[in-house]
Amino acid sequence: MAGIVNRIEIAYICDESYVLATLISLRSLRKNRTENVHYLVHIILVDMNQDQNLQQLFQKEAVENEFCIVVHQSKVEHDDIFFQHSYVSKAALVKFQLPEILKNTAEVLYLDSDTLIRPGLEDICGIAVDQRYAAVVKDMSVSLGKHMQELGLNDYFNSGMMYMNLQKMRKDGIGKALLDWKRNEKRHVFMDQDAFNVVLGRDVKFIHPKYNLIYDMFRKYTSSEIASFYEIDHFAAAALNKTAAVLHMAGARKPWKEQESEQLVEWLAYIESFEEFAVCEKAYYNKNLAMDAELHREMHERKSGQCDLEQKLAAMMEQVDGNYRQVQHDLQRKILESEEKNAIYKNELQLKIAELEARMAVYENTFFRRIWRRLTRRKDNL
């Protein structure tokens, strides 16, 4: 898919532990929807036994003719390949089934539930993946570790955002290949990610990190290191947290679990009522966050107001500083011009002095010769 995008298909996979997270990501997607672009969002509920309340919960987020939501039901099969992971649900294995679940879809943008969507997401779907399995973003932390080398890979991507060519994957039987590799893997490190990296191999297209910004890397690496790894400008790397189209809260530090999460305030802004924290009884969340949500919003508004004042003050200071620098520059220029004029005047003065001294020497020489001649004449007369 290239050129102007009029319709984007997006897929989320959600189990009972990620209902609230999926809802928040969906709202951020809806809020930052690009005008004149139609979104068809697939919500794949895993092991939820036809829960009508959950289906209605998601479908009420739809916007007529702009934001269509289709809820699918699925379940995790192949229990023989399941293993326990600290913060990744087994529902991630349903990613292997996406080509079959969405059998009428040619290309889909898959997003993990622990994401916040900002403006610019639609640009991903302007990337051509006709001859590739997916467009993806490199995972810096894994790429710089030993695990990638142990897998025999030269590059490694994060599977939390994939613009997937489902048509090509169906044609090449990728779904079965992913399951087969997962069933036979020797080391259980990631739920689904290793399988995608090994099976898709180099037949993927790496794109800008702003389309899957894993904030955790800012805790491990400097902006210069990030810029070097992704081969982007240093200032662009430093600003990624603000410019990212997809903010991925990968790792154990989730905003619905702990207040130390850097994305807590932004994430809470999409909560419409405290009751949403209990949307699913078995959901893993920090109940204290629900009680503190309003306080955080108020603090965020105050900080925003303070930030605006600081920005205005900074702008004023910058203007004053600019005026001072201009005055200083003008003064230095005038001093330099004065010094240049003084140097020219001094040089001219020295030339005139030298000229006068030369004339004086000539005059003295002539004067003494005249005196000498007169004395000589008087002597001769005597």
Image (tube, grey):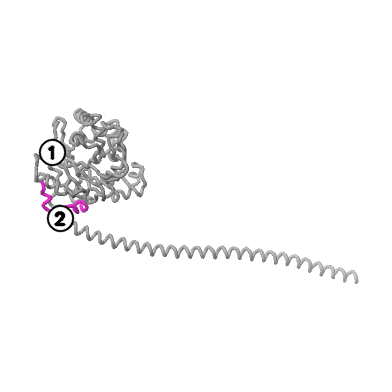
Residue 224 x/y as whole percent: 35, 46
Residue 291 x/y as whole percent: 13, 55
Q: Is residue 243 magenta?
A: no
The residue under the point 17% across, 58% down is: 295
Q: Quick check: 188 above or below 331? A: above
Q: Label for residue 227?
A: none
Disc 2 to disc 1, how far (Cα)?
Answer: 34 Å
Q: Residues within 10 Å of mark 1 (few under 14, many from 20)?
A: some
Q: Write down the region rendered in magenta.
A: 264-280
Q: Secondary structure at mark 2?
A: helix
Q: Residues within 10 Å of mark 2 (few under 14, many from 20)?
A: few
Q: Quick check: 3 above or below 153? A: below
**Residue located beneath label 2 in the image:** 292
Residue 117 x/y as whole percent: 24, 48
The residue under the point 12% across, 42% down is: 16
Question: Residue 70: which quarter of the image?
Answer: top left
**Residue located beneath label 1 in the image:** 73
Q: Which residue is nearer to you in this view: 381 or 304?
A: 304
